[in-house]
Image (cartoon, rainbow, N blue to C red):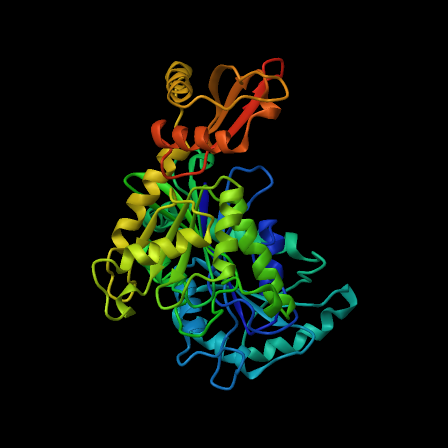
Amino acid sequence: MITGVVSIVGRPNVGKSTLFNRLTGTRNAIVDDRAGITRDRIYGVVTDDNETDSFLLVDTGGFETKGAMYQPFRENLVWKQTQAAISESDVVILMFDGKTGVHPHDKDLVNYLKKEGKEVIYVVNKLDHPEHKDKALEFYELGISEYQVISASHGMGVGDLVEIIEEKLKTLSQERNQALGKFLNKYQPDGDTNKITRIALVGRPNVGKSSILNRIIGEERSIVSDVAGTTRDPIDSYFAYNGKPYLIVDTAGIRRKSKINEKIESLTVMKSLQAIENADVVILVISATEPLSDQDARLASVAIEQYKPLLILVNKWDLVEDKDSTSADKFKQDIYDSIQDKKYVPIHFISCLTNQRVFKTMSIVESLVEQYEKRVSTSSLNELLKRIVQEHTPALIRARTKRVKFYFATQVRTAPPTIVIKCNFADELQESYKRYMKNRIQEEAGFSSIPVRIIFRAKADELPEE
């Protein structure tokens, strides 16, 4: 059971993401020596040793000022995300940098949190050895009565910090716990978490992924800016659609490999590709104002090669001038030409700016999930197999002067749907005939919009285990 919400705030590069990763036991927050890496709110769960109680932990961007040029936004969007995290938190960890000492912005944050009336735990980080504790004494000048000394990178003092957090959360009133219910359900849906459908939002920078996320879940969960590459960490957001739980991950824009010159860019690419691998459905967002790039086509291929249901969202359709009744079909055909004619992939045209057709996105996703988890009976598959072969028999295998004989077909797993077809000469069946059978099975077995894995096996081969 989640007992409360805890956020970590502080100036840039004081170690917030390092502490987040250590407490959650993940690497969800990108850690780098450069200031200003984290921008959005990053959520994780910290569970106690008995695995009975846990709390929601929120990593935030560094406290931004007008002079901090590492955040290239016209308005203070990072601080808005931090304010949102503070407002929804029961306990706030205000982290200081013990190596650099007291900074004027530390005082600003102390005063802000006092004004908000939040329960605050003051933490002095980066003091790696016990003999360095005296260096933390100067933080008393901020007007705080006590603080905890830790080293997030080495784990020193982190266990004691967790105990203090848990003690403070235990003092929450029953009324507050009830008020938390609606909020917490967004991040801890009821039921088996393995049944949560995972959606990955991928695409190049500045195509509108974060805007789409915010539209779908109905809140400003990700920073939206016209600055390319705004999102860096993958942003996890739970929500419900038609009574079913979903987890949607807004990933950083994937650039061309030749443009990945910095460590931070290569980390975001790796995390985006991991999001595809872990997803049940992949949404590739492209811009209607630009033709499908080679990079977009490669992202689509990555999803298809992993047998992931793929939806291509064409955003900014409102910006296309001189559209007529054939414009969408022409745009679709150009996309299909670039992804090796995979015409089963659904393409949906939207405008996040005008909210045009965005609401239909989740109904398409729901349909893809139904196909992804669909199981067809063996009898139905064998009736289909018989019909396919009767309508178009395979060519003669010249080396054997025989035709391939098909014995039976069976679905051995779902997600992705995997069908094994037993025949006598599996290794010698023509590739063109395999494609024909695969297309017919997709169309007629209820998998018309997703990739299906078809395995041809010789009769003596064992069936793969689900």
Total numbered badges shown on the rendered structure: 0
Of the 4 image quadrants, the one containing the C terminus is top right
Residue 211: where, in percent of width, then height?
Answer: 35, 63
Q: In which quarter of the image is residue 209?
A: bottom left
Left or right side of 37 for 445: left
316, above or below 165, in the image: below
Left or right side of 179 for 163: right
Comparing 352 with 54, the one in front is: 352
Residue 165: where, in percent of width, then height?
Answer: 54, 54
Of the 4 image quadrants, the one containing the N terminus is top left
Q: Is residue 360 visible?
A: yes
251, above or below 109, in the image: above
Residue at 53% over, 80% down: 105
Residue 390: where, in percent of width, then height?
Answer: 39, 18
Residue at 59% over, 67% down: 146
Residue that protrudes farthest toward the bottom in the picture: 67
1, above or below 292, in the image: above
Left or right side of 176 for 113: right
Q: Can residue 218 be seen in this view?
A: no
